[in-house]
Image: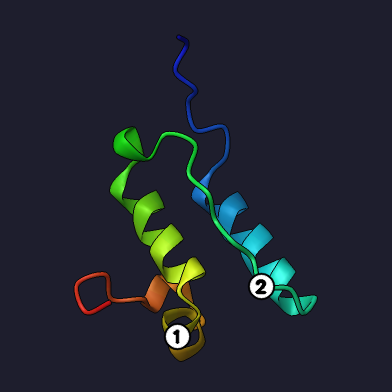
Amino acid sequence: MRRRRNDTTMEENLYRIYTLRDMGYDPYVMIYDKPHAPKEIRHLQRWCNNRKISKSEPDFSKYDTKKG
């Protein structure tokens, strides 16, 4: 089985998430190969998919991954 690499940058991922939120949608991040995904992508998924977290800190760059 061929392993898929990350085809997007973090900036592109955040642009899509912020754009969807600005349009009134609730984006949902699904990781293709979670066991091999970088920590930053797993943190992005947790931040985005947990509405309580993303509403309390709407800017991912300010999200404290240790605090959650």
Of mark 1 and mark 2, the one earlier in the sequence is 2
Estimate the x, y position of residue 39 in percent, counting from the top left. 29, 49
Scheme of image coloration: rainbow
Task: Name the residue located 41 percent from the left edge and 71 percent from the top edge.
Answer: 61
Residue extending furthest toward the left: 66
Residue extending furthest toward the bottom: 56
Q: Quadrant of residue 21?
A: bottom right
Q: Is residue 22 left or right of residue 50?
A: right
Above or below, 16 relative to 22? above
Q: Which mark is residue 52?
A: 1
Depth check, front residue: 64 or 34:
34
Residue extending furthest toward the right: 23
Q: Secondary structure at mark 1?
A: helix
Residue extending furthest toward the top: 1
Q: Is residue 18 left or right of residue 9?
A: right
| Disc 1 to disc 2, C-alpha distance | 12 Å
| Amino acid type at mark 2 | Asp
Quarter the C terminus occupies: bottom left
Above or below, 16 relative to 30? below
Above or below, 3 relative to 54? above
Task: For label 1, count other residues whose C-alpha is less than 10 Å away and answer few (under 14), some (14-19) or many (20+).
Answer: few
Above or below, 23 relative to 37? below
Task: Name the residue located 19 percent from the left edge and 72 percent from the top edge.
Answer: 66
Task: For label 2, count other residues whose C-alpha is less than 10 Å away and answer few (under 14), some (14-19) or many (20+).
Answer: some
Q: Secondary structure at mark 2?
A: loop
Q: Are marks 1 and 2 in contact (CB under 8 Å)?
A: no
Estimate the x, y position of residue 7 in percent, counting from the top left. 57, 32
| Amino acid type at mark 1 | Lys
Mark 2 lies on residue: 26
Q: Tally the numbered discs.
A: 2
